[in-house]
Image (cartoon, rainbow, N blue to C red):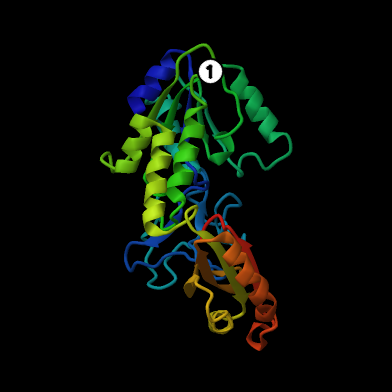
Amino acid sequence: MIGAIRQTLEAGDQVLIFLNRRGYAPVLLCEACGWQADCPRCDAHLTVHYNGQSQRNSYSSNSYLKCHHCDWQAYIPTVCPDCGSQNLDAKGMGTTRLSENLHAIFANPQTSKELYPIIQIDRDTTRRKDSWENIYEQINKGNPAILVGTQMVAKGHHFPNVTLVCLPNADRGFLSADFRSPEHTAQLMIQVAGRAGRGDKAGRVLIQTLQPDNELLLKLVKDGYLSFARELLQERQMMGLPPHRHAALIRCEGKTLAATTQALKDAIAHLPNAHNLAVLGPIDAPMSKKNSRYHAQLLLLAKDRRQLHHVLGQWWQPVLALPSAKYLKLTLDIDPVGW
């Protein structure tokens, strides 16, 4: 991939590298005891944010830990809070770290004869007024450059001088617990690939994967999205998942997980006797704690949409009136995007 990037730049063209993870690294880890920097308000790791100049100073304004779910921020510790070790390491890669690594290869006079600009495009670099307009103007000058971007660059942009699109770490979307993740990942890959070759020159797309034999990925690359989608639909039919079943997702949010789970259990007890629905749950939400609130969910699946709506019409208002649902937030999502 590095060789292809260099060849593209030397030909006077631009390269787009897509990584849908902003920040420097997704996890700060103590290699002595295994401690990880977690958000105190969410079931999520704190993302490491810093640049090369601020790494040496953990208390720099450009150096901090941040939760991308609730915006909690904290200083990067100099020693492990659990064991006192200084052996703290940022694990994984975000757009900032990727940009720094590319800078060392393509914009460092010690390693590259020609210096090429590395343009990072994500929420961190486009937050200020006119920042996106300035970046867009720089790209449209057409000079050789490497664009490093998140989902912001995947849709709707026309970069006529981009002839190479690279997708590192393309496996993540095919390994998610969300059954729709392969579908969304494939759509995103197609959209990102569409940024290459939009001008007069032909485009090329490189996908980096640790699973080159992944059947879904091979189906997408060799046969296109339509064939890929048909295979996913067959899997959904065998598993009884949408669009071959109709879904309603009930989410419950409260101060404790026990209270939200109990409310959903009581809701199940109030279902009509002959409802003929598949009832899955209650279970913890994929992120059970978010912004100091706890989340549980209940999934209803039906073969017939009218039957689902008929049951919900009789059942939902009594559920909202349950004593155990008092002071809790209950929401009903018909045809949820995911669960």
Q: Secondary structure at mark 1?
A: loop
Q: Relative to 109, does residue 169 appear above or below in the rendering?
A: below
Does the rendering let one see residue 113? Answer: no
Residue at the right extreme, as displayed = 129
Residue name at image x 33 percent, y 24 percent: 3
User: Is 103 in front, or is 98?
Assistant: 98
Q: Residues within 10 Å of mark 1 (few under 14, many from 20)?
A: many
Residue name at image x 67 percent, y 88 percent: 323
Left/right placement of residue 201 relative to residue 331 reads left
Q: Which residue is mark 1?
A: 161
Q: Relative to 327, does residue 176 appear above or below in the rendering?
A: above
Left/right placement of residue 299 relative to residue 174 reads right
Does the rendering let one see residue 44? Answer: yes
The image shows a total of numbered marks equal to: 1
User: Is 221 in front, or is 120?
Assistant: 221
Q: Position of residue 15 (x, y in %)?
A: 47, 25
* Quarter the N terminus occupies: top left
